[in-house]
């Protein structure tokens, strides 16, 4: 079979799999007001694609490798769109690269500046499907966000590497006494502010801080900041261009969590997560009261896969 025939067969297989999965998930998610969910994630070994549903839009990615060819992804996209009756303008194709490119969530692909509003339960978030590899919402942490909401009542909540502050929105809706969200990206902080407005979350007692995380942690310790509950969900790798400072989660997570623990009340709880595929948590020197891996309960049904989990998550009591 020649290459184009192989691609055509793969496109048909992918389209059939996605259509079947959508039929299985869409009714229940619609009742739960969940408008973003995963339909396919490299389930067939030779079809290195990921397909996500965004309220009537499709985001279709290819896990890139040296053998990738430019014709493959558009062919997959067209087949899935046709099977799902989705118009071409609502199909968004992305190339996904692993390794140290992971931290480039803010690198622009386009400058279309078009956001749509999606629902996740009773909250709403702004999504940008075109301009970046990531869209503004990590739906694989849908369950974790709900956990934070359920624990947030009257708590002081810290959100490091907050991105678009979706965890903070959940904490605020859960009755947090205050939330504080930190990100080095000015674009992310503006986006987070838009999400606050969309969910009628006042900026009083819900602070957004544009800063490098380690710089913030040093300053917060000097100022005597203290929190009950925190989420720490950093990229696997990143570089701060202005300071030429690189971050590697395998190398630097001990320093990061040590500085975070210094801001926590005794008995405070830190949710720490990573999507690094070969990560090993090594914080026994910090002597937390309890470390419990909760990965299984944080991954939604649509993100369960045969390969390594899409993320890992620990609940750490300080």
Image (tube, grey):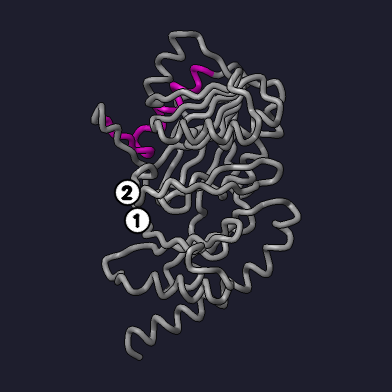
User: Bounds of the magenta span?
Assistant: 245-263
Q: Secondary structure at mark 2?
A: helix
Residue identified by numbered label 1? 97
User: Does the residue at mark 2 contact the one at mark 1 (Cβ under 8 Å)?
Assistant: yes
Q: Is residue 180 visible?
A: yes
Residue identified by numbered label 2? 101
- Which mark is drawn over residue 197? none
When the figure is inspected, residue 308 is found, relative to residue 216, above or below; the finding is below
Q: Kindly indicate the quadrant of the structure image that contains residue 228.
A: top right
The percent position of residue 92, horizontal first and vertical second, equals 45, 61
When the figure is inspected, residue 255 is found, relative to residue 5, above or below; the finding is above
Q: Secondary structure at mark 1?
A: loop
Which residue is depicted at the point 46% across and 38% down? 281
Compared across the picture, whether 291 is left or right of 5 comes to right
| The one of 302 and 256 positioned closer to us in this rendering | 302
When the figure is inspected, residue 125 is found, relative to residue 89, above or below; the finding is above
Q: Is residue 318 visible?
A: no
């Amino acid at each position: 079979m020649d290459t184009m025939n192989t691609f055509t067969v793969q496109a048909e297989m992918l389209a059939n799999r996605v259509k079947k999965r959508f039929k299985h998930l869409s009714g229940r998610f619609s009742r739960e007001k969940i408008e973003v969910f995963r339909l396919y994630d490299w389930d067939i070994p030779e079809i290195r694609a990921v397909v996500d549903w965004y309220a009537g839009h499709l985001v279709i990615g290819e896990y890139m490798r040296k053998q990738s060819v430019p014709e493959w992804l558009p062919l997959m996209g067209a087949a899935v769109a046709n099977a799902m009756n989705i118009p071409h303008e609502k199909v968004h194709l992305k190339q996904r690269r692993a390794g140290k490119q992971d931290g480039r969530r803010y690198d622009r692909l386009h400058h279309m500046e078009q956001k749509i509003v999606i629902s996740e339960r009773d909250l709403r978030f702004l999504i940008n499907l075109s301009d970046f590899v990531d869209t503004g919402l990590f739906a694989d942490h849908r369950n974790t966000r709900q956990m934070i909401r359920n624990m947030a009542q009257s708590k002081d909540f810290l959100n490091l590497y907050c991105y678009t502050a979706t965890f903070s929105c959940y904490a605020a809706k859960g009755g947090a006494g205050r939330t504080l969200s930190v990100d080095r990206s000015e674009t992310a902080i503006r986006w987070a502010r838009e999400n606050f407005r969309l969910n009628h979350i006042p900026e009083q007692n819900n602070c957004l801080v544009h800063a490098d995380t380690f710089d913030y942690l040093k300053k917060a310790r000097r100022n005597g900041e203290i929190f009950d509950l925190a989420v720490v969900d950093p990229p696997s790798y990143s570089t701060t261009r202005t300071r030429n400072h690189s971050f590697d989660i395998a190398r630097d997570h001990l320093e990061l969590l040590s500085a975070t623990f210094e801001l926590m009340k005794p008995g405070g709880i830190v949710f720490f997560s990573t999507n690094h595929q070969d990560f090993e948590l090594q914080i026994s020197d910090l002597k937390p009261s309890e470390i419990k891996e909760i990965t299984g309960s944080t991954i939604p049904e649509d993100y369960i896969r045969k390969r390594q989990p899409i993320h890992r998550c620990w609940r750490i009591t300080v």
